[in-house]
Image (spheres, rainbow, N blue to C red):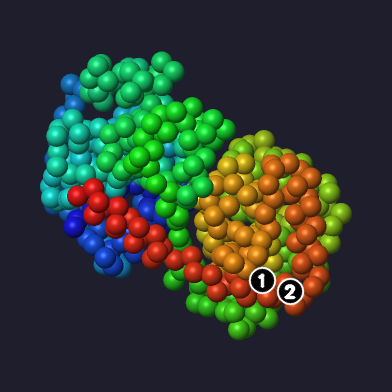
Amino acid sequence: MRVLFASSEVFPYSKSGGLADVAHSLPLELNKICEIINITPMYKFIDKDKFNIMPFGKKFILTFGDNFYEIELFRHTDKKIDTLFVYNDILCEVDTLYGYKNDSLRFGIFSYAISKVTELLKADIVHLNDWHTALAAFILKEKKSAVKSVFTIHNLAYQGVFEKDILSILEIPKKYFNQESFEFYGKVNLLKAGIAYSDRITTVSPTYAKEIQTKEYGCGLDGFLSKYKYKLEGILNGIDTEYFNPKNDKSIKENYDVKTLNKKEKNRNLFYENLSIKNSKRPLFIFIGRLVEQKGISLIIDLLKDISKMKLEFVILGEGEKKYEVNLMLLSKKYENIHFIKGYDEGMSHKMYASANFLVMPSLFEPCGLNQMIAARYGVISIVHGIGGLKDTVFQDERKCAMGIKFDKFQKDELLNAIKKALSIFENKKNYEKIVKFDMKCNFSFAKSAKKYIKLYKEVL
Ligand code: GLC
């Protein structure tokens, strides 16, 4: 069984969020069971020399919408996985991944290229991820291709909605501009193609699979998704447990495991030293993520005044919307125990996990979330809003992994109480360490979920 795994971002080549991590770690596990080939754009900011990305010796021309687009393929093999890179100037001559006026055409080109490569490689299945690849499901069905498609929704909030003129540009026949296919409030919704035309739909946690069929979390597509619930399934993400391993993580000073937890404290002391936090014995709370509404950053900002009075240090790492960045800059100047590191730095995030006691993750909604799993691996207890994947991975007792603190309503008081609860857990050293050790032993590898994807691939063939 040969599977082409298509994603607009793949770690370590390109990344804007969790999709890149999953597009890296899931194929690693799948490849142990079947043949996986990754496909992703050859953005110009990917350093070909650094990664040793070579020409694949294949060029072809795509013709659609009365135009033609030249494609060149590149290849890199890492840990026995081939990644194919699609180069086309419109798709790839950009400084960041998304946010361009012609994104519909850019990812239209990518989707046409994916469907062409399924033929070239004689793939049995194409696994499409998010709206950037969704059109490929439609193209394959239109061509009556034998290749089956599985479509994974990583975040329903991003749907690829564009003006009607893209129908002709992407050569989508007008007859498909209706509610059953692409039409969405008078516009064209590319994600709908993935939902309607793929053979199976998955999303990244069982709870999110249910939530997206409700008005509250359905982002306008709850009805449409409910219609296809017979082919919809929630499969929980995992993490690359070799890469996220405090025992041999090269970004941290003192490597540790469940038996050498005292070294975690050393990391924290060092981290405090670097941030010029003097002799603090206080616990470290961290937030790592994009500064956008989804991640619940507004709830945190609203609470910083209260948090500033508590016996803890709070470090926030991230970048995103200007209003949040400015607010965090000002508040971190005002309050001594609040610290803001603007930007995203993979190495810094590892240092934070290695040093922290608690992770704060109050997401408004969260399809899966990976930080809480990374946190468990590094002995950091998570404080989460109990929705989506957070509900499926954080529990208040020892029955399931991981153990943490969960609050039900997206409200200031609830988060504040959860932080207070964390402080009281920290004060009882024995209990605190028991939870940390329990969490570090949790297995969040992708192995279990990879088996579920393989089962699903076999079912569609
Ligand atoms: C998106 C979601 C996140 C999920 C990730 C990987 O970034 O917001 O919850 O973990 O995709 O599937």
Q: Is mark 2 within 8 Å of ligand 1?
A: no
Pinpoint residue 132: horizontal percent, then vertical percent. 35, 38
Residue corresponding to mark 1: 435
Q: Is residue 35 above or below residue 195?
A: below
The percent position of residue 170, horizontal first and vertical second, equals 26, 25
- On-image quarter of the N terminus: bottom left
Task: Report the residue at 35% width, 40% height from top.
Answer: 230
Q: Are marks 2 and 1 in contact (CB under 8 Å)?
A: yes
Tag 2: amino acid: Asn
Name the residue: 52% across, 59% down.
346
Q: CA distance from mark 2 to mark 1?
A: 6 Å
Along the line of sight, the residue nearer the viewer: 157 or 392 = 392
Count of numbered circles in the view? 2
Residue linked to disc 2 = 431
In the rendered structure, the answer to whether residue 442 lies left or right of residue 304 reads: left
Q: Quadrant of residue 278?
A: bottom right
Is residue 349 or residue 153 the one in the foreground?
153
- Mark 2: give few (<14), some (14-19) or many (20+) Cα within 10 Å: few
| Residue type indicated by callout 1 | Ile
* Of residues 155 and 12, the one drawn nearer to the viewer in this rendering: 155
Q: Secondary structure at mark 1?
A: helix
Badge 2 element: helix
Q: Residue furthest right?
A: 309
The picture places residue 2, in percent across and down from the top left corner, at 19, 56
| Above or below for 203 versus 266 | above
Q: Residues within 10 Å of mark 1 (few under 14, many from 20)?
A: many
x 79%, y 45%: residue: 413
Q: Which mark is residue 90?
A: none
Where on the picture, by quarter, is residue 47?
Answer: bottom left
